[in-house]
Image: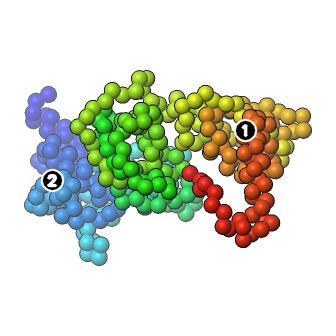
Amino acid sequence: MSAGRKKQSDATRLGTKPSQIATRSQIERLFQIVAEIQSGNFPNCTVLQKLVDRNRRTIMRDLEFLRDSLNAPLEYDAVRRGYHFTDDFTLMPPLDLKSEDFLTLHFLRQSLAPYEDTEIGAHMKKSFARMFGLLTGTKTWMKWDAAVAFRGEPKTVASDEQLKTFEVLFSAINTNRVVQFEYHGRGKEPSERQVEPALVVMNKGRWYLYAVDRDMRELRTFALSRIKKIKMARAEFCPLRPALSPETLFQHSFGIVVEEKEPTEVVIDFTAQAADLIRESVWHPNQKLEPLPCGGVRFRLSLTSFYEIKPWILSWGHYARVVQPSELVDEIRTALASAAENYSSPEQGANRKDKPPL
């Protein structure tokens, strides 16, 4: 294809007249600018300059090109002091979305809601708005807020350093670099750590790092919210072989606690009143269910730690009974007796100093 025919093809694809051609670099800028405006943040020229790394005159030319050559419904809002589209607009043919597509997008957006006050969550939410607005040229998905709601994870508390921590870890994992940080363990003095990062995981709204501690030479779990003053060291390391994956890491864990020891089979009997609820969900990938004569259900799985399944068992109250192992039976019996004491002697219960939950 000749250069002239290619330029005309690009112009046609963008909906411009052949005499008003957008260069490749301008097309790339236009996509970025449109995506930012579609996000609903009312960006001004200064914001757009930083976004595409161009001067004010170039940004003004791009905005004029959008409005005059591409017929974009672009206006400047004097109150919000930024640009917005007064109607649907996209640089490419919008996707023909059905109701189930909008429902899926609404679910994905709502899934980000518990984390929107954190740095990582705020960036993810903004990214979602940019990408969806750019691809569809519409904000119709916002109307689903009034019709459909999803409730799930509790709202996550903001952490000032979490985004920086995440970015450093992501880079270190991909380049096999050691990281150093100050770790503020629960109820402990801060300690300096050097680790070989392997995997970052989110569980119930919290981010965790799984890494080999260079002093202990074992896999450890670190909460990102407790990591401070992180930096990438010069030292490199050989990654775990085989590479750590969520499937292998959590195959014998009921949450985020991972222990390197042989798993133990856990057996719990649930009454008939709780049986349907147990059957309706997959509580763990390796669970096995067996019917009981009374209409209840027997629940089996193998774990390396009882730490996280204990609160889950206790949450079922008298609808659950641990059958084995005996160690877990004793721990649940002790916990229930302690709970009973809280109600027989409220003052004593309020002053207890048990180990807090994860």
Label 2: state its secondary structure.
loop
In the image, taking residue 355 as reference, residue 130 lies left or right, namely left
The quadrant holding residue 33 is bottom left
Q: Is residue 140 left or right of residue 287?
A: left
Lower sequence index among marks 2 and 1? 2
Q: Residue at x 85, y 34 (%)?
A: 292
Work out whether 346 lies above or below 283: below
Which one is nearer the viewer's eye here, 260 or 61? 260
Determine whether the residue tagged by mark 1 lies in a helix, strand or loop.
helix
Q: Position of residue 206 (x, y in %)?
A: 49, 51
Residue in the picture at 35% in, 51% down: 182
Q: Which quarter of the rendered picture does the N terminus lie within? A: top left
Residue 237 visible somewhere in the drawing: yes
Q: Which of the two marks, 2 or 1, is nearer to us in this view?
A: 1
Q: Which of 284 and 94 lies nearest the eye of the viewer? A: 284
Tell me where residue 212 sits by quadrant: top left
Mark 1 neighbour class, 10 Å CA radius: few under 14, some 14 to 19, many 20 or more: few
Where is residue 279 shown, x and y percent of the image?
74, 39
Who's the residue at 29% across and 35% down the image? 177
Q: Which residue is mark 2?
A: 53
Spatial CA distance of label 2 from label 1 is 62 Å
Percent across and percent down for residue 109 are: 47, 53
Task: Kindly identify the amino acid type of the residue bearing the numbered disc 1.
Answer: Glu
Residue 59's spot in the image, x, y percent? Answer: 15, 58
Return the residue at label 1.
327
Please say whether residue 225 is visible from this viewpoint.
no
Q: Is residue 67 left or right of residue 243?
A: left
